[in-house]
């Protein structure tokens, strides 16, 4: 299994902290996989650890809209039956990925937005969070800087995602984010959209993307990568190829993590950093 803590430009002094968060998430997921658990449970568990860690732009600590509010996006998908669940522009709830999972299990629809996502979550037994418990000082500072500069020039960094393959041979992917700092209310990025920020299909593998959402959306990055994996590509080569292809086609930068149907892992980024951590039977590795 492999997790990412977002493509971006994490200053060198803070890399260790971000990589540590990724390691903790990967370890939690690996414990599930080692006990025979599903890739879906493992990917969700990893993302919950990252949502709860305030240094990442997901769940607690997520970035703010231009109006200073939280609008959260998350998606989870499994590769056996291609079931998926997602929420977008969700008001504050502690773990958006758990709500996305409830959407997947409910099975009636794939994606709920804003007030409808809130209503679904409440019906499913989740309680809204006090915004003050999820909005960090760092998120407020980033918004103030973005507003002062007058442009929403980039993304926040720190989006989180996970891909996993289990002993049953099934793959799954999960992604969660606050999106871009100072985004216009109602803006939805790639992360919660099946095929853009998140995709899983046992015929190819699982993908979670991060980076410039508008670019990732326009090239359907995750579905494109999984289709390439299905044609027997090696994850690392595929990740590099689609990230380079996105840059060439729409001028967007970002990163991608992949788990192939055979369990091989790969990642690539065109940003300065993308923190990540991997765990497999008998080993682990992490970096930026
Ligand atoms: N892709 C995310 C979005 O555009 C941002 C990120 O990955 O940092 O919402």
Image: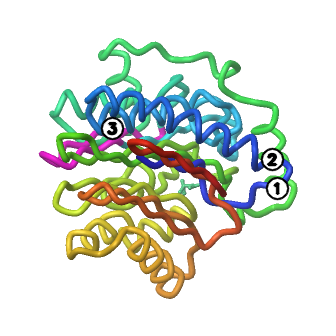
Q: Which mark is residue 14?
A: 2
SS for tag 3?
strand
SS for tag 2?
helix
Which quarter of the figure has residue 230?
bottom left
Dots 1, 2 in contact, CB < 8 A: yes
Q: CA distance from mark 3 to mark 2?
A: 35 Å
Magenta region, mostly helix, strand or loop? Answer: strand
Give the residues in magenta: 76-89
Dots 3, 2 in contact, CB < 8 A: no
Q: CA distance from mark 1 to mark 2?
A: 6 Å
Q: CA distance from mark 1 to mark 3?
A: 35 Å
> Mark 3 or mark 2, which is nearer to you?
2
Q: In the image, residue 138 lies at what x, y percent?
A: 80, 37
Instruction: Tell me which numbered mark, 1 or 3, is placed earlier along the sequence.
Output: 1
Q: Which mark is residue 11?
A: 1
> Mark 1 or mark 3, which is nearer to you?
1
**Residue bearing the label numbered 3:** 112
Residue situated in front as seen by the camera: 107 or 166: 166
Residue situated in front as seen by the camera: 25 or 286: 286
> Label 1: few (<14), some or many (≥20) within 10 Å?
few
**Is residue 104 located in the magenta-colored stretch of the structure?**
no
Indicate yes or no: mark 2 CB to ligand 1 under 8 Å: no
Indicate yes or no: mark 1 CB to ligand 1 under 8 Å: no
Residue 241 in the image: above or below residue 46: below
SS for tag 1?
loop
**Is residue 84 located in the magenta-colored stretch of the structure?**
yes
């Amino acid at each position: 299994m492999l997790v990412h803590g977002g493509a971006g430009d994490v200053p060198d002094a803070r890399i260790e902290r971000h990589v540590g968060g990724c390691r903790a998430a990967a370890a939690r997921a690996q414990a599930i996989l080692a006990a025979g658990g599903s890739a879906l449970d493992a990917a969700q568990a990893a993302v919950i650890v990252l949502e709860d860690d305030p240094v990442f732009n997901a769940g607690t600590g997520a970035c703010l809209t231009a109006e200073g509010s939280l609008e959260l996006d998350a998606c989870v998908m499994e590769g056996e039956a291609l079931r998926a669940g997602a929420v977008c522009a969700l008001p504050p709830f502690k773990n958006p990925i758990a709500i996305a999972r409830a959407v997947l299990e409910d099975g009636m629809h794939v994606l709920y937005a804003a007030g409808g996502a809130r209503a679904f979550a409440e019906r499913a037994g989740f309680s809204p969070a006090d915004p003050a418990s999820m909005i960090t000082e760092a998120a407020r500072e980033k918004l103030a800087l973005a507003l002062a500069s007058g442009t929403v020039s980039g993304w926040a960094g720190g989006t989180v995602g996970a891909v996993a393959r289990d002993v049953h041979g099934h793959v799954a992917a999960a992604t969660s984010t606050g999106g871009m700092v100072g985004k216009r209310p109602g803006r939805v990025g790639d992360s919660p959209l099946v095929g853009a920020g998140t995709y899983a299909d046992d015929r190819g593998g699982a993908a979670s993307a991060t980076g410039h959402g508008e670019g990732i959306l326009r090239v359907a990055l995750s579905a494109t990568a999984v289709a390439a994996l299905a044609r027997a590509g090696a994850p690392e080569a595929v990740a590099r190829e689609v990230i380079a292809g996105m840059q060439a086609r729409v001028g967007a930068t970002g990163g991608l993590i992949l788990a192939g149907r055979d369990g091989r892992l790969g990642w690539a980024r065109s940003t300065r950093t993308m923190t990540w951590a991997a765990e497999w039977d008998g080993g682990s590795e992490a970096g930026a």
